[in-house]
Image (cartoon, rainbow, N blue to C red):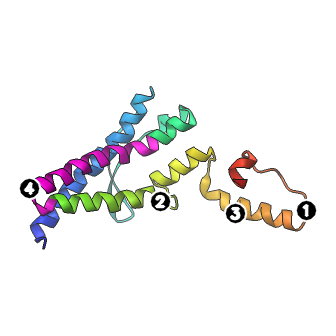
Amino acid sequence: NSSAADFWMGYLLFLVSLMVHEFGHASACARYGTQPSDIGFTMYLIYPAFYSNVTSAWGLKRWQRVMVDLGGNYLQYILGSLYITCFLLTGQQMFWVAFVMILYGSAFSLNPVFKFDGYWMMADALGVTNLSDQPKRLIRHAWRKLRRQPNDPLPWPTWRSNG
């Protein structure tokens, strides 16, 4: 049984992990020789959110950008490991709450549907810009192919769309 205090303390620890997450993106940028810009706080829809401006990552190679995309979760998982260790050593529920929030938060962050880390990781891994526009393009391409109509080639190698 977690008390309300454990929940709110766990939530505060989770918020700390979100800031660490943004430092992960920034440090991955720096690791590959680009200069990250500001790290800050904003409101996303109705939710408070931290951000790291890593626009400079566009100058990196594709797989280096993937590492920048994953850098936030990497550092957040390291902190999560510390939290679960603290829970196992002390039994304090706030560490368990923070750890579980990190797991759920990262699962949400890594899904490729919303323009969060998973979306950018997928776009960079595939080498496809404007990934959210591609389903429409693929459907249109397949429809024209089925109807044996002239078709413009897709803007990426066929192994990315056939494989």
Q: Where is residue 107 in the image (x, y as percent from the top left)?
A: 40, 60
> What is the distance, in whole Å, between disc 2 and disc 3 at their CAs?
19 Å
The structure residue drawn at horizontal position 45% and vertical position 51%, both measured from the top left corner, is 117
Distance (Cα) linking label 4 and label 3: 52 Å
> Looking at numbered disc 2 in the image, what kind of residue is underneath it?
Asn
- In the image: residue 79, left or right of residue 26: left
Q: Residue at x 50, y 42 (%)?
A: 66
For disc 4, the marked residue is: 90
Residues at circles 1 and 4 in contact by the CB criterion of under 8 Å: no
Front disc: 1 or 4: 4
Q: Which of marks 2 and 3 is in front?
A: 2
Front residue of 113/126: it is 126
Which mark's residue is nearer the viewer, 2 or 1?
Answer: 2
The reply to whether residue 96 is visible in this rendering is yes
| Element type at mark 4 | helix
Residue designated by label 1: 149
Q: Residue pushed farthest bottom?
A: 1
Q: Distance between the residues labelled 2 and 1?
A: 35 Å
Q: Mark 2 points at which residue?
A: 111
Residue at the disc numbered 3: 136
> Which stretch appears magenta?
68-94
Going by the numbered disc 4, the residue's amino acid type is: Thr
Q: Distance between the residues labelled 3 and 1?
A: 17 Å
Q: Is residue 82 magenta?
A: yes
Q: Residues within 10 Å of mark 4 (few under 14, many from 20)?
A: few
